[in-house]
């Protein structure tokens, strides 16, 4: 159980977790006039052109908004569906000025967007999430320091800023993982270490840029919770996802997670508390480890919708992307209830290559679509690469077993490894 000296926040968030819907409580700390809702028809600005941005565009457009995307790539997944694509760097002054002059509000789909870009826009526009929240989440040192300082349980860690830091770490942190402070994703920027010498070598290999060393935890399961928070401090929490990774990349999310109800309630309360502690505005993902079957540890936070929340599109009343549009536009938040058991399977570029690296070929999607309750989402990326997220499938079932069986079948049919993993056969993940 998380240490909690933050009684008021804990109580109000516990209130949230008992209802899967939006909790109508407002934070006494917030003052000032409520924001004026931005009516459909207006332009919303988006920094980042990846798949999260693409799905945000689609949700915002479906509510009647127009979206302008800033992304340096030519055929980016979001740029190609946006009403306007500004092909420019995130700090490009003319592009930012265009957003400022044409949009009523702006958001981001990418945590590594420079905080300065959000700060610039925030001078004249409504921006959600705020630059300060994004800045915390984009640096593992500030993220872990913030979480630990707020009384949230994190894996024991040390900050590595110099070779001397690396050479003098506490042996209690071994075996561990050295993680670069910035720009890590999908397991990139991480090195597993067993000895001090290996810590120093890993720090050197990362060109001595700031990093954290984190003790390796025996994981009973990995979970995530998507949470949205609006200007008034209302918090909306989705059900808990149980996540299976392969090679450091999310492979499958099973929702609801197969964990005891009280752990699920704790996880949701914890996520709501993190959002409140950050004074967050927008959609946030809190990644959690379960240790010893019962102890929740915050792994990391993402200041945006998350891969493990894609199931919300097909299985929930309101998707994480629609909610992002609602919060950015200062509209009331939608219900987060899940109406159908779901298992999401990621589609990585690997399945485009059948032994022939030189000649990728499109997988046979009719095999997926032959499952009448499988929802296929492809991100329109031109170039498949191994490990690259190209799309996902959400398997909807009358029961969770049915959704799991469909996920196993689709993995097998597409040649995605792990179709017979025990975790996909009805039992929750165990320590690996
Ligand atoms: N301290 C840890 N103990 C055990 N496994 C870990 C630890 N930190 C990370 N991992 C594993 O590595 C994966 C990726 O690490 P994470 O910190 O979430 O980085 P990323 O930004 O790449 O998602 C996690 O989902 C988990 O499986
Ligand atoms: Mg992660």
Image: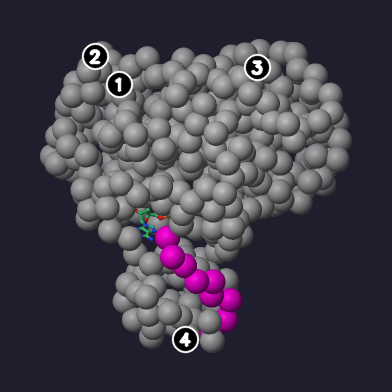
Q: Residue at x 44, y 18 (%)?
A: 337
Which mark is in front, 3 or 2? Answer: 3
Q: Are marks 2 and 4 in contact (CB under 8 Å)?
A: no
Span highlighted in magenta in the image = 155-163
Mark 1 or mark 3, which has the lower sequence index?
A: 3
Q: Are marks 2 and 1 in contact (CB under 8 Å)?
A: yes
Mark 2 or mark 1, which has the lower sequence index?
A: 1
Q: Residue at x 45, y 34 (%)?
A: 268
Residue 61 visible to an observer of this rendering: no
**Residue occupied by mark 2:** 398
Left or right, 36 with respect to 338, comes to: right
Determine crowd level at label 1: few under 14, some 14-19, many 20+ residues with C-alpha closer than 10 A: many
**Can you tell which mark lies on residue 341?**
1
**Residue occupied by mark 4:** 167
Instruction: Place residue 70 in its image quadrant.
Output: top right
**Residue occupied by mark 3:** 332
When the figure is inspected, residue 293 is found, relative to residue 103, above or below; the finding is below
Mark 3 or mark 4, which has the lower sequence index?
A: 4
């Amino acid at each position: 159980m998380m240490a909690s000296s933050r009684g008021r926040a804990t109580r109000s968030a516990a209130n949230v977790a008992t209802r899967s819907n939006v909790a109508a409580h407002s934070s006494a700390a917030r003052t000032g006039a409520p924001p004026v809702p931005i009516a459909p028809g207006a332009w919303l600005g988006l920094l980042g052109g990846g798949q999260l941005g693409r799905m945000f565009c689609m949700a915002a457009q479906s509510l009647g908004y127009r979206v302008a995307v800033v992304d340096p790539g030519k055929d980016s997944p979001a740029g190609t569906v946006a009403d306007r694509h500004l092909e420019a760097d995130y700090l490009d002054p003319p592009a930012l000025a265009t957003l400022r002059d044409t949009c009523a509000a702006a958001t981001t789909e990418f945590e590594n967007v420079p905080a300065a870009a959000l700060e610039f826009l925030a001078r004249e526009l409504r921006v959600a999430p705020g630059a300060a929240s994004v800045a915390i989440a984009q640096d593992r040192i500030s993220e872990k320091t913030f979480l630990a300082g707020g009384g949230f349980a994190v894996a024991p860690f040390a900050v590595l800023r110099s070779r001397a830091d690396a050479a003098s770490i506490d042996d209690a942190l071994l075996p561990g993982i050295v993680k670069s402070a910035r720009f890590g994703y999908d397991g990139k920027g991480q090195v597993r270490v067993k000895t001090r010498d290996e810590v120093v070598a890993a720090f050197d290999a990362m060109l001595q840029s700031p990093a954290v060393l984190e003790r390796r935890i025996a994981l009973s399961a990995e979970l995530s919770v998507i949470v949205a928070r609006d200007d008034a401090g209302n918090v909306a929490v989705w059900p808990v996802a149980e996540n299976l990774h392969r090679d450091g990349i999310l492979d499958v999310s099973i929702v609801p997670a197969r964990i005891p109800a009280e752990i699920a309630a704790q996880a949701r309360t914890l996520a709501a508390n993190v959002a409140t502690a950050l004074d967050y505005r927008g959609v946030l993902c809190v990644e959690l480890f379960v240790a010893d079957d019962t102890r929740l540890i915050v792994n990391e936070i993402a200041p945006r919708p998350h891969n493990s929340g894609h199931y919300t599109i097909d299985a929930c009343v309101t998707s994480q992307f629609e909610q992002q549009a609602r919060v950015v536009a200062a509209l009331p938040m939608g219900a987060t209830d899940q109406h159908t058991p779901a298992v999401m399977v990621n589609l990585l570029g690997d399945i485009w290559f059948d032994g022939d690296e030189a000649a990728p070929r499109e997988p046979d999607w009719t095999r997926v679509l032959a499952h009448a309750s499988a929802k296929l989402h492809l991100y329109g990326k031109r170039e498949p690469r191994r490990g690259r997220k190209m799309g996902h499938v959400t398997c909807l079932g009358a029961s969770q077993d049915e959704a799991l069986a469909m996920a196993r079948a689709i993995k097998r049919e597409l040649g995605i490894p792990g179709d017979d993993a025990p975790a996909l056969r009805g039992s929750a993940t165990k320590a690996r």
